[in-house]
Image (cartoon, rainbow, N blue to C red):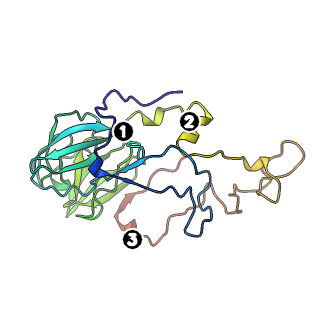
Amino acid sequence: MTTSDYSTLSATEPFKGLTTGRKSFAGRNSKGRITVRHQGGGNKKLYREIDFGQTKINVPGRVETIEYDPYRTAFIALVVYRDGDRRYVLAEKDMKVGDELLIAENAGLKKGNRMMLKNIPVGSFVYSAETRPGAGGVLARSAGTYLEILAHDAGYTDVRMASKEVRKLPWNGYATVGQVSNIDWNLVNIGKAGRSRWLGIRPTVRGTAMNPVDHPYGGGEGRQPRGTKRPKTLWGKVTGGRKTRDPKKWSNQYIIQRRPKVR
């Protein structure tokens, strides 16, 4: 069993004015039917309201605390701005209590600053980038992720994503300089079944261990091979190699190079 490095955290309780309670639906839809399996239980938790839009333009801010967030893999930072407003933002991996940050069109190449993509030099790392200017950061928000700036041309910035996909983003959209915190999150070993239950993850039963009525892989005497030409889900839908992206998706026009196929 391993855990993330929590030595950089500076607070154990969240800022009350930016927390709300959220009901857990355990993977059920509005009719009460399970639409996402293997969810339920887990520790009770408060939702921290994260400012992904970061609209405090040209108002300097100071990092007050670095905190754990049970709803996301990255750590978060409580920032107090010069006008007295407090907001949660995604913490940069090297961010510390007392650091100054600024959101501006050209805020300067300092980790934690947020600025327009067109003003960020080629080769820099950014996160929480906007796909539509003013809509808030949506790309590269999970622990340890970042986008690499490759080029600026004709109103667009080319970025390389974690999947190695290369795509265009409007260069007047904002992004935060640096890399998301908690970079070793993907190395955590859960260690025991109970720890998954604390996280709200319920057990997963193998299809081959089921009966034929319950799964395409079920049944047979003893240990049997899959028995189907292509891998299938519980509902008989082909998976593991079938393309699922909508060929008419609006953002296809912005993809320069698709992510490489994993073999």
Q: Earlier in the sequence, mark 1 or mark 2?
A: 1
Name of the residue lying farthest toward the bottom: 248
Disc on res. 68: 1
Q: Which residue is mark 3?
A: 250
247 and 234: which is toward the camera: 234
Disc on res. 195: 2
Rendered location of residue 41, percent (x, y)? 57, 48
84 and 196: which is toward the camera: 84
**Secondary structure of the residue carrying numbered label 2:** helix
Q: Nearer the viewer, mark 3 or mark 2?
A: 2
Quadrant (top left/top right/bottom left/bottom right) for the C terminus: top right
Quadrant (top left/top right/bottom left/bottom right) for the N terminus: top right
Residue type at mark 2 is: Arg
Q: Is residue 61 left or right of residue 8?
A: left
Rendered location of residue 216, percent (x, y)? 77, 57
Residue type at mark 3 is: Trp
Answer whether labels 1 and 3 touch (C-beta < 8 Å): no
Is there any visible trace of residue 127 in the rendered image? no
Residue for point 9% across, 47% down: 82
Residue for point 41% across, 33% down: 184
Res 215 → quadrant:
bottom right
Estimate how packed mark 1 is, as few (under 14), some (14 to 19) or many (20 or more) residues with alpha carbons within 10 Å.
many
Estimate how packed mark 3 is, as few (under 14), some (14 to 19) or many (20 or more) residues with alpha carbons within 10 Å.
few
Q: Find the distance from the CA under tag 1 to the CA under tag 2.
A: 17 Å
Is there any visible trace of residue 33 in the rendered image? yes
Vertical arrangement, residue 215 with respect to residue 149, above or below: below
Residue for point 53% across, 47% down: 262
Rendered location of residue 36, percent (x, y)? 59, 58
Answer whether labels 1 and 2 touch (C-beta < 8 Å): no
Answer whether labels 3 and 2 touch (C-beta < 8 Å): no
